[in-house]
Image (cartoon, rainbow, N blue to C red):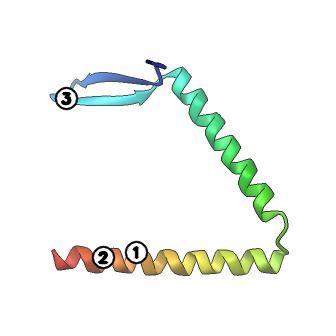
Amino acid sequence: MSRKLIAKTANPKDNREVLISLTATGLAAHDAIVDGAQERNRRLLEHLSEAELHALLRQVDQLTAIAAEMLESEKNLR
């Protein structure tokens, strides 16, 4: 079943490549998904105090930094 969410066109600079973009329908679907995710995140976090939210965000930042370091280490092993 084709929902016509993406459009494919040849790359005018290199016809061996295909460029993929969202159609108007695809953009609408994307926006609906993002809006729903943002609403779920808002509902999830609304029960945290400001201090708890800041602590959570610091921990997420810390885990993100550790993950980036791990990824860099793995790249250097190749």
What type is the residue that disc 3 sits on?
Lys
Q: CA distance from mark 2 to mark 1?
A: 6 Å
Q: CA distance from mark 2 to mark 3?
A: 32 Å
Give the residue drawn at x 82%, y 72%. Answer: 48
Instruction: Return the x and y of residue 57 as percentages of the image width and height.
Output: 66, 74
Between disc 1 and disc 3, the foreground one is 1
Question: Label 2's element?
Answer: helix
What type is the residue that disc 2 sits on?
Glu
- Pointer 2: what residue? 72
Is residue 75 shown above or below 30? below
Q: CA distance from mark 1 to mark 3?
A: 34 Å
Is residue 20 shown above or below 67? above
Instruction: Return the x and y of residue 76 as percentages of the image width and height.
Output: 20, 78
Question: Label 3's element?
Answer: loop
What type is the residue that disc 1 sits on?
Ala
- Circles 2 and 1: CB atoms closer than 8 Å: yes
The quadrant holding residue 28 is top right
Between disc 2 and disc 3, the foreground one is 2
Q: N-terminal of the two: label 2 or label 3?
A: 3
- Pointer 1: what residue? 68
Q: Is residue 55 left or right of residue 7?
A: right
Give the residue drawn at x 37%, y 80%. Answer: 69
- Pointer 3: what residue? 13
Q: Which mark is residue 46?
A: none
Q: Is residue 69 left or right of residue 47?
A: left
